[in-house]
Image (tube, rainbow, N blue to C red):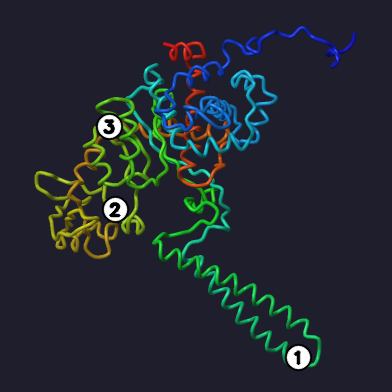
Amino acid sequence: MTHIFGFERSQLLLLPEAVDDYVGVDNPVRFIDQFVDGLDLAAAGFNHVTPQATGRPGYAPGDLLKLYIYGYLNRVRSSRRLEMECHRNIEVIWLLRTLKPDFKTIADFRRDNRAAFRVVFRQFVLLCRRLDLFGRELLAVDGTRIKAVNNKDRNFTRNSLEKFIRAADERLDEYLRRLDESDVAEAGTSGARTKNLAEKIEALRKKRGRYGELLAELEQSGESQISLTDPDSRAMAVHTKVGVGYNIQLAVDAKNKMIVVTNQVVDMGLLKETAEPARALLDVEQIDVVADRGYFKSEDIEACEKAGITPYVPKPQRGSSVRNGFFRKDEFRYDAARNAYVCPAGQELTPIREGKLRELKKVDYGNATACRACALRPRCTRDVRAVSRLENEDALDRMTERLKARPEILDRRRETVEHPFGSIKQWMNQGAFLMKGLENVRAEFSLTAFAYNLRRALNILGVDAMTAAVRG
């Protein structure tokens, strides 16, 4: 018995006459080709769709878009690696019809057409809606942090800059003291130590001056921090692995865990801004949306109800009463008919004063007489307990009742929205951005979300059904 041997490299082979024979009918590149060919690239905002009458011919934007979609679908995002794939990958050779653009052309295309990628993602979402891949009943909203092209050492806050400046001043004072001592000790000698200290002092003064300039720039801009490599990136929470990056917000449809919209914002108070575009894109009058405690804000929850979005957001347990181990506010029952709260001891708390909070009317409820004689007082307050109520808190009461009726919806949120996050960071290996700047990052993540949705759609329906829908 012997081993299996291949052909000699110099031997002539009877290969297929067409490149098309190397690509199977169920290969995803066939869908990519049909989908891009069916797009109105000029309307999407791509540059150079119509070639100039004079000058050197350039690559068609459709071909470069196909290359990027293929690359993100197959975990190849670098322009240099995409250039290599054009030379050695038979699928890319088929897709681009043997075109071989250089890496700079590929990179410039992504940068120059950054706004158009979001339109392409939207067009694919509309195709998926037509194919009934979205349930259009429940959205899960959440955010994830993705690393930016900015080292943590090149991100500064006002406190860190002030700390660096104080440390630099202390070091300068120490160096100057040592310099004076060296001048005396090295009198009449070569003064090598004095020269070394003088160089250190000059370097430290330059560094201290740079910190001062950054602090002045930060105070002038009104921002809380500054990043030197990628000015739009921000330092993330200390407990995350991402030092400096972007907080990516997604609205995910619960049926097939497919992304509907993406946004780069912060969590607090922006539930409507993330869910409303998704509701409009799915073309429904009413939709449920579930999010975690980071999205709890009364104004935003009220705005969701007015926009045809039914929110499910658990209330965070925070405040001085929670920190001190006293009864939480949700343990006080509001009686709308009497405009009063009923405390855990059964006593009635009535309005005692009015004020403002975030431009909203706020009413405090209390009962000093009952508090001082209450047996539960050690578990409730140190003096007299007051419970506040905002003018739009009816929306929070309604949401609390909805959560009591559907407690399982919070678990469904987790399993829905964590699927794309895990797939993007682990399977697609996209835990860091390659580009700098918010607009560039948005373009890059539009391609990432497109590739995630495309993989999900192909796994569910297959290449034939997806291609037929594009032709169709």
The crowding category of the residue bearing disc 2, from other C-alpha atoms within 10 Å (few below 14, some 14 to 19, many at least 20), is some
Instruction: Give the side of residue 285 with respect to residue 197, left or right.
Output: left
Q: Nearer the viewer, residue 472 or 387?
A: 472
Residue 172 location (% of width, % of height): 61, 79
Alpha carbon separation for disc pair 2 and 3 = 23 Å
The crowding category of the residue bearing disc 3, from other C-alpha atoms within 10 Å (few below 14, some 14 to 19, many at least 20), is few
Amino acid type at image mark 2 = Phe
Instruction: Give the side of residue 45 with respect to residue 307, left or right.
Output: right
Mark 2 element type: loop
The residue indicated by pointer 2 is 327
Mark 2 or mark 3: which comes first in sequence?
A: 2
Alpha carbon separation for disc pair 1 and 3 = 83 Å
Q: Which mark is residue 185?
A: 1
The residue indicated by pointer 3 is 405
Seen in the picture, residue 131 relative to 398 is either above or below; the reply is above
The label nearer to you, 1 versus 2, is 1
Amino acid type at image mark 3 = Ala
Alpha carbon separation for disc pair 1 and 2 = 70 Å
Mark 3 element type: helix
